[in-house]
Image: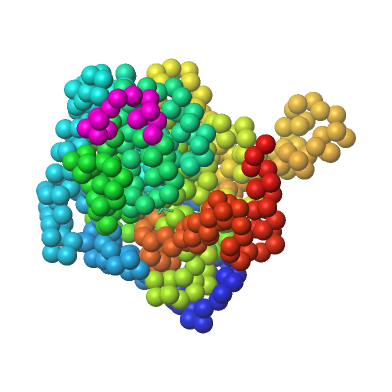
């Protein structure tokens, strides 16, 4: 664990709790046990360590755990009060303690008809009204009733946002591509690098383009800069247009009506969400507007339903049958006891190719904290590094390190059995690789087996012996297999909610507030100062010699 530069006097007590101490003792006994032995000892292992949820199967049998491990992990979850905190979250208590906010992305997909209260107000009528507004608008854009200033229907939708206001809807659009409107294109602009918006605008026409400016705060510099550039492009490209025409091509999604108006978007064209929805949990809200337009509101609602079903599972199942809890506790087992630094997400479904990037924000912005809820130093590691790439491509890139590197990297292998691609041969090749990889990671290949295979390949003895050490696989690399029947909107909703709740459980065990993100502030503040210095051409603030040297280098090279 990285030592914190400022160690606070008060230390979080987690590592001295009975459940933690018991796990540490147990770890010493199990650390060297190979999973091959565990499978040999127990023919029921798959049956015991797999759970079905609707069309989804979680197989967690290829983990370095026994019944005792799981029992101890569940008692850690219990001791941390996971169930109590879960109930607090769902009932609208302000569990985001540093910002004094409730955490209610679950209310956005509450399909139960039951009320949800924040400060004694039932928020469900607000949620439902916004969904209706999204339906009305997305239907109009989809069926060509939403007409631009030149009398033409919309053909291209550009979502301008960043972080949670980009990654969620962007990932959903990619994931649900097979459900998309065939003559509508959706684009996402996030980076403030002018190349991003510049390249995009170069192939769009103002008369058929709709911009969605999505920002929870509506103060994010990158988003507003891109939105202003888009507005300028629209006004210049469109020629003689009135303010009323802007309303036909710009809508906003935000919690901040004042800033939306200030930017020049009529509040009538504003879709709302609320401060109890965290940015990285906002794809279920109007932030999902681009995806709702792309795949249609019925599919969007189906996605909400899938998430709601996972919410019910999370609320109702006992800890040892609870998929998000199981995944969370396995993550803690590897992160805190085996000291695994990272965890890879490997979707064997081309349409889930953006899932790793989406989960990077969801997980690392939530649990990348070193101070607990009470402001005490966490003396244990917290959020793991999340990374990954779509399944089979990764095999030809970084899997070498997973198989033979020196690090323990637990993995989530995700597969859809029925591809939307409709090519049986492709499907089988993909599935066989998915299955083979988790088996290879678990079993490895012993020296004896490797020698045997080299012999069979008729390789000269002295050459074979030289090659031998390089061809041994130690195995014992843990993986979860998450298999869904087909990537439908409903399955996607369940999958995403599963990960959200996994992140929640880990945050509770580590005693963190997973719903603030103060860690992004410092860089933003310094960037503001440096921008002033770049514009003024003068050094106005104190910097280290590296930053000063770089600043100077930027200035010298900024113009040819
Ligand atoms: O800088 C981090 C962050 O605040 C994220 O949490 C958020 O998703 C992103 O910026 C965008 O914020 P906004 O939606 O307010 O523009």
Q: Position of residue 181 (x, y in %)?
A: 29, 22
Residue 268 appears in the picture as rendered: yes
Q: Seen in the image, is 62 located left or right of residue 127?
A: right
Residue 121 drawn in magenta: no
Q: Seen in the image, is 536 located left or right of residue 126?
A: right
Determine whether 342 is above or below 119 in the image.
above
Residue 295 appears in the picture as rendered: no
Name the residue: 39% across, 75% down.
374
Most foreground residue, 196 or 5: 196
Most foreground residue, 515 or 305: 515
Give the prevailing secondary structure in the magenta stretch: helix
Query: Where, quadrant-wise, is the N terminus in this rendering?
Result: bottom right
Name the residue: 78% across, 39% down.
468
- Check the image and name the residue furthest to the right: 462
The stretch of residues the image draws in magenta is 232-246
Name the residue: 53% across, 55% down.
532
Q: Position of residue 214 (x, y in %)?
A: 33, 43
Query: Where, quadrant-wise, is the C terminus in this rendering?
Result: top right
Determine whether 292 is above or below 420 in the image.
below
Question: Which quadrant of the figure has residue 117?
Answer: bottom left
Residue 239 drawn in magenta: yes
């Amino acid at each position: 664990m990285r030592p914190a530069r400022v160690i606070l006097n008060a230390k979080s007590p987690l590592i001295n709790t009975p459940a933690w101490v018991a796990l540490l003792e147990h770890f010493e006994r199990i650390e060297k046990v190979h999973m091959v032995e565990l499978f040999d000892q127990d023919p029921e292992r798959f049956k015991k360590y797999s759970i079905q949820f609707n069309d989804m199967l979680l197989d967690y049998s290829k983990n370095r755990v026994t019944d005792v491990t799981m029992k101890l992990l569940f008692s850690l979850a219990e001791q941390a009060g996971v169930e109590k905190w879960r109930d607090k979250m769902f009932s609208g208590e302000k569990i985001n303690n540093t910002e004094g906010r409730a955490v209610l992305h679950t209310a956005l997909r509450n399909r139960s008809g039951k009320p949800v209260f924040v400060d004694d107000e039932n928020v469900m009528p607000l949620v439902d009204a916004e969904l209706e507004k999204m339906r009305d608008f997305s239907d109009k854009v989809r069926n060509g009733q939403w007409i631009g200033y030149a009398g033409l229907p919309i053909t291209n939708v550009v979502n301008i946002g960043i972080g949670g206001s980009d990654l969620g809807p962007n990932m959903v659009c990619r994931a649900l591509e097979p459900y998309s409107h065939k003559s509508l294109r959706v684009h996402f602009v996030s980076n403030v690098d002018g190349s991003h918006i510049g390249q995009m605008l170069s192939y769009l026409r103002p008369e058929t383009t709709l911009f969605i400016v999505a920002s929870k705060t509506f103060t994010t510099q990158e988003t507003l800069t891109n939105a202003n550039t888009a507005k300028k492009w629209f006004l210049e490209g469109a020629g003689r247009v009135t303010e009323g025409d802007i309303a036909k091509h710009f809508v906003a999604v935000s919690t901040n009506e004042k800033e939306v108006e200030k930017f020049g978007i009529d509040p009538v064209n504003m879709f709302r969400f609320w401060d109890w929805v965290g940015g990285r949990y906002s794809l279920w809200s109007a932030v999902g507007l681009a995806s709702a337009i792309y795949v249609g509101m019925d599919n969007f609602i189906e996605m909400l339903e899938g998430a709601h079903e996972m919410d019910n599972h999370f609320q109702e199942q006992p800890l040892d049958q609870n998929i998000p809890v199981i995944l969370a506790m396995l993550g803690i087992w590897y992160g805190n006891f085996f000291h695994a630094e990272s965890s890879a997400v490997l979707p064997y479904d081309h349409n889930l190719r953006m899932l790793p990037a989406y989960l990077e924000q969801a997980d690392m912005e939530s649990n990348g904290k070193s101070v607990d809820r009470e402001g005490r130093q966490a003396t244990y590691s917290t959020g793991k590094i999340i990374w990954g790439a779509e399944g089979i491509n990764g095999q030809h890139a970084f899997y070498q390190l997973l198989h033979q590197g020196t690090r323990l990297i637990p993995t989530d292998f995700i597969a859809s059995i029925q591809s939307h691609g409709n090519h049986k041969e492709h499907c089988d090749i993909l599935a066989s690789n998915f299955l083979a990889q988790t088996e290879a990671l678990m079993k490895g290949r012993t020296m004896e087996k490797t020698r045997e295979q080299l012999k069979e390949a008729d390789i000269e003895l002295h050459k074979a012996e030289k090659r031998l050490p390089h061809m041994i696989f130690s195995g014992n690399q843990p993986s979860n297999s998450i298999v869904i029947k087909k990537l439908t909107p409903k399955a996607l909703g369940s999958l995403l909610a599963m990960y959200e709740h996994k992140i929640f459980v880990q945050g509770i065990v580590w005693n963190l507030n997973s719903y603030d993100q103060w860690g992004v502030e410092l860089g933003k503040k310094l960037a503001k100062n440096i921008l002033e210095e770049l514009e003024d051409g003068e050094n106005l603030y104190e910097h280290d010699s590296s930053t000063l040297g770089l600043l100077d280098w930027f200035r010298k090279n900024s113009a040819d």
